[in-house]
Image (cartoon, rainbow, N blue to C red):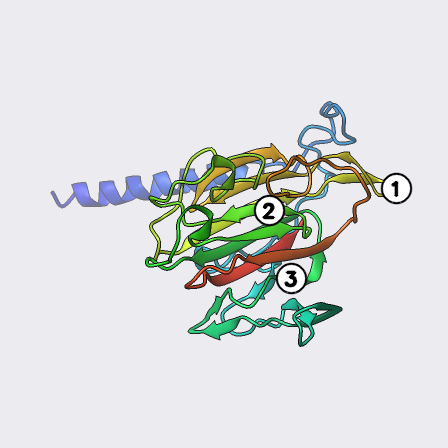
Amino acid sequence: MKLLLPILLLAAVSVRAADSKAKADEKPSPIGYSDTPVIPGTQWKVHDIDRPRPVAVAPGKTAGAPPADAIVIFDGTSSDSLQAKEKDAKGKETGKMAPCPWELKDGELLIKGGDCWTKQEFGSCQLHLEWMSEPHTKGNSQKKGNAGVFFMDRYESQMLDCDNNPTYADGMTGGVYGQTPPLVNAVRPAGQWQVYDIVFTAPKLENGKVVEPAYITTFVNGICVQNHTKIMGPTKHKNITDYSGEFPEKAPIRIQDHKNEPPVRLRNVWIRPM
């Protein structure tokens, strides 16, 4: 037994030494290659050593938190990134913009007082937004927990209490309003937070005219309900749409106040231009 222990220790040392030598003899993994064929339709070779690598972006520290390169629209502390249309004493729009009128309460915005727009303009972008409707909201169908987010102030992704609340298919949460219903009804019951993660691709323009339509990919509570869906044109109510006329490269995002009671609540809104 006394002789066996030194032998085992010697064997272990020998194995470690052999391991270290093998690792020293290993060639480091190549960063890329310059002798591979060119990928069709690109200027880059397969695994091209000279192809620029994506920059690093730190993700949010918790689920739903904004990543390092996001533009924060609302983080529970201020509504300064939003604005409303100013109205005179008779309720007519003056053509000027005013501060966001929505009440900030307990880190949430109560969507009440008219629609609001982002101060910044966006084209293609990634949007994260969380909202909640109250369990005892009056009404039914489109009059129950209704709001919406309009990309480029034109294309609406519907927000609605769709839990045990029948309505028309192209007016449900995750739907391209008036055009394409969501693939599934993915809402949680009223009184729980709903989570929107949306990738919006702006239409392509030539001299202000649309030559390729907008597209949208939408997740509701982590469930894909639109998969690169073509948007047929600006949102309309009870009518069809198209891309006739001229369009801008960028425009504000609008969040709709549908004037339901109690109001829909909003939190944790951020955008990544793409």
Q: N-terminal of the two: label 3 or label 2?
A: 3
Please give the residue where the numbered disc 2 appears in the rendered image: 156
Instruction: Give the answer, above or below, for where 267 lies relative to 233.
Output: below
Q: In the rendered structure, which amino acid carries the disc numbered 3?
A: Trp
Image coords of residue 62 (percent x, y): 44, 59
On screen, residue 52 versus residue 25, left or right, reads right
- 85 or 91: nearer the viewer: 91
Q: Secondary structure at mark 1?
A: loop
Q: In the rendered structure, which amino acid carries the disc numbered 2?
A: Glu
Q: N-terminal of the two: label 2 or label 1?
A: 2
Image coords of residue 114 (percent x, y): 58, 64
Q: Secondary structure at mark 2?
A: strand
Instruction: Give the answer, above or below, for where 127 lies relative to 25.
Output: below
Picture quadrant of residue 135: bottom left
Q: Residue at x 45, y 49 (%)?
A: 160
Please give the residue where the numbered disc 1 appears in the rendered image: 207
**Residue 96 visible in the displayed image:** yes
Image coords of residue 151 (percent x, y): 64, 50
Q: CA distance from mark 3 to mark 2?
A: 13 Å
**Residue 67 visible in the displayed image:** no
Marks 2 and 1 in Cβ contact (< 8 Å):
no
Picture quadrant of residue 119: bottom right
Q: Secondary structure at mark 3?
A: strand
Please give the residue where the numbered disc 3 appears in the rendered image: 117
The residue carrying pointer 3 sits among few (fewer than 14), some (14 to 19) or many (20 or more) residues within 10 Å by Cα, namely many
